[in-house]
Amino acid sequence: MITNNISLKEYNTLNISVKTTYFAQPKTSQETIAVLKSDTAKNNSIFILGGGSNVLFKSDFDGLVIHPCISDINILDENEDTIKVEVGAGVEWDSFVEWATNRNLYGIENLSLIPGNIGACPVQNIGAYGVEVKDVITSVQGIYLDSLESFSLSNAACKFDYRNSVFKQELKNKTLITSVCFELRKKGELNLNYGSIQKDVEALGERSLLNARKAIIAVRNSKLPDPKEFGNVGSFFKNPIIDIAIAKDIFKKYPSAPSYEVSESLVKIPAAWLIEQAGWKGKSIGNAAVHKNQALVLINSNGQATGTEILELAGAIVSDVEKKFGISLEKEVNVL
Ligand code: EPU
């Protein structure tokens, strides 16, 4: 059940070559509890690893990595308009999106092709093209690591926010998520308001779920590197939310700076734009590089980068953006 001295290179999408002292891949909740009750779990630090698409390993992990592999999709309830479904933490996020769009279920098509597994989707409230996963999550199930008691947290109790939730705050490193419940719609409207998505869908033909998924996949493939080709964790930084007064100073100097209104006093500025203006798009330090098509994505350019090299590049970017704009970029990725 628990193996020793395992390489994690295949289990993190940055493809960083590190090892863990102990590794477990439980396939059911019962197996998960058995792993958590083991002496290995009691005597070592524990890290829960989902699809590895949002983690950066600085060095080998001296402890127990648990990689939940619970992979059932169960329909809990359905009526004329909606369907409730419980999905195991080990299911790959995009295979669930494919499952839903193939069944004509609306709600997550804009989140197509986001790397990672179901168990991680609530943690950072994954989002793309005007949709966040919080819009369709009804509850999150799991186990508290200290008491080994099970929990089910409602959507409200998860305290979802932009790339944030209770699992990144009060409950950080305190839970293991075993499944997520979603409510998807049988009928509905597509959300095509972001960028050129509407035009992209219309170019494919009718406004259908499958065409929305196809269009989103095409946009992502054109901008974001395939982790199989260049190791990456998607967006490395969050888009900073800043005071309108600071933003106005930036707009004076850069009238075409992109921005999204968050509230009357706050705006979000794309970190990719700040990084590009600071001159880092396409640049590299050693084996770590800034992607040439999306400046928010750092890549392991030849499969040889270490976590430290990626962090060095990130540090240089943060420092230059801070100098140029007075804005401090915050990492989206978890550093271990
Ligand atoms: N831009 C640049 N240079 C670039 C790329 C973008 O200046 O190299 C500017 C452009 O003005 C563009 C704007 O930034 O219009 C926004 O770019 P994009 O639509 O690519 O989105 P983003 O804000 O950079 C966010 C998410 C992505 C998500 C996209 C699409 C965050 C941290 N990232 O990126 O999420 O796919 O929107 O909705 O919010 C992820 O989290 O891993 C991820 C990829």
Image (cartoon, helix red, strand yellow):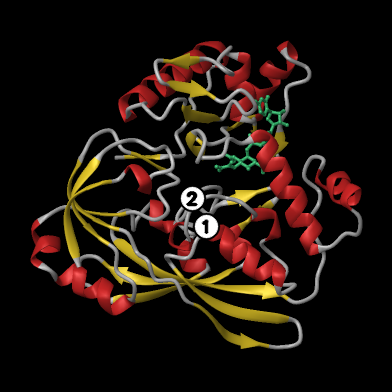
Q: In which quarter of the image is residue 141?
A: bottom left
Residue sitting at x 48%, y 21%: 289
Amino acid type, mark 2: Asn
Element under label 1? loop
Report if the CB atoms under discs 2 and 1 are less than 8 Å apart.
Answer: yes
Can you tell me whether the CB of the residue at mark 1 lies under 8 Å from the nearest atom of ligand 1? Answer: no
Residue sitting at x 39%, y 71%: 70
Badge 1 crowding class, 10 Å Cα cut-off, few under 14, some 14 to 19, many 20 or more, is many
Residue 184, horizontal then vertical, whole percent: 67, 73
Residue sitting at x 46%, y 32%: 330
> Which residue has dot 2 on it?
164
One can see residue 263 in this view:
no
Q: Residue 160 carries which label?
A: 1
Residue 23, horizontal then vertical, whole percent: 22, 56
Q: Which of 223 and 264 is in front in this view?
A: 223
Amino acid type, mark 1: Phe
**Location of the C terminus (image quadrant):** top left
| Depicted 321 relative to depicted 69: above or below | above
Residue sitting at x 56%, y 39%: 226
